[in-house]
Amino acid sequence: MTWPDLIKMTPDIVTALAVVVGVIVAALGLKTWRRELQGRARYELALSILMEVREIRDAIHSFRRKLAELDGPPDLMTKWEKIREPLKELDSDLKVANIIFGDRLHKPKMALKECTDEIILSINSYRRQQESKQKDERRMEKMDSENAILWGKPDDEFSRKVDAAVGSFDDELLVFLRR
């Protein structure tokens, strides 16, 4: 090859080098863009999970605080429903996080689950206690009623009931005695 041939090929060589450099720059740009997208996805997921767990924490504290302020027996499951939706959202995000972050959130997830499970167990226990207490109260009312029959006063409900029963005999039989 002579110099004049090389000079004639220079535009082709420059074009080929430009294409190679362009491909390299494009590949590096795509790699950087991909890392940026992955970083943004990780950031948004982490932020979402942190916001959800804080919402759950605040809801649990509010749930417990409101219960402490109540005088009568509360409807616990209705109040707990307000916490269930954020828990579902968190569970969904944690499934995605398991794919992206691996199992690094497993221990925190289980610690929070243990807390929510304890609350649910306590709710169920409280409900059973209330049902038992209501049964005991009905049993006590029945016992009081039965005891009132034995040790009642002359003008109590049972005395009036006895008087009414006897009175119905009077109504039916006095007619025959007056003839």
Image (spheres, rainbow, N blue to C red):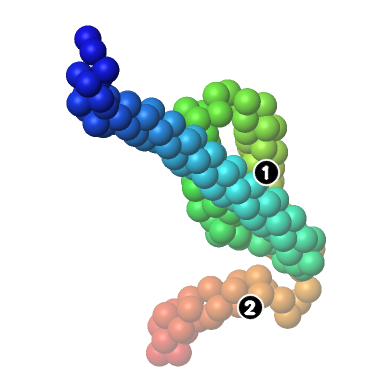
Work out whether 10 lies above or below 83: above
Query: Residue 119 shows which numbered tag?
Result: 1
Work out whether 86 lies above or below 111: below
Work out whether 164 lies above or below 14: below
Residue 169, image x and y in percent? 48, 76
Query: Residue 160 shows which numbered tag?
Result: 2
> Which amino acid type corresponds to the residue marked 2 in the rendered image?
Arg
Query: What is the total number of numbered labels drawn onto the structure image?
Result: 2
Residue at 47% x, 36% y: name it. 32
Of 25 and 73, nearer the camera is 25
Residue 157, image x and y in percent? 66, 75
Secondary structure under the numbered disc 2 in the rendered image: helix
Number of residues whose C-alpha sits closer than 10 Å to that of mark 2, classed few (under 14), some (14–19) or many (20 or more) = few
Of 18 and 106, nearer the camera is 18
Q: Specify the quadrant that holds the N terminus.
A: top left
Of 167 and 30, nearer the camera is 30
Residue at 73% x, 64% y: name it. 66
Residue at 62% x, 52% y: name it. 51
> Which amino acid type corresponds to the residue marked 1 in the rendered image?
Ile
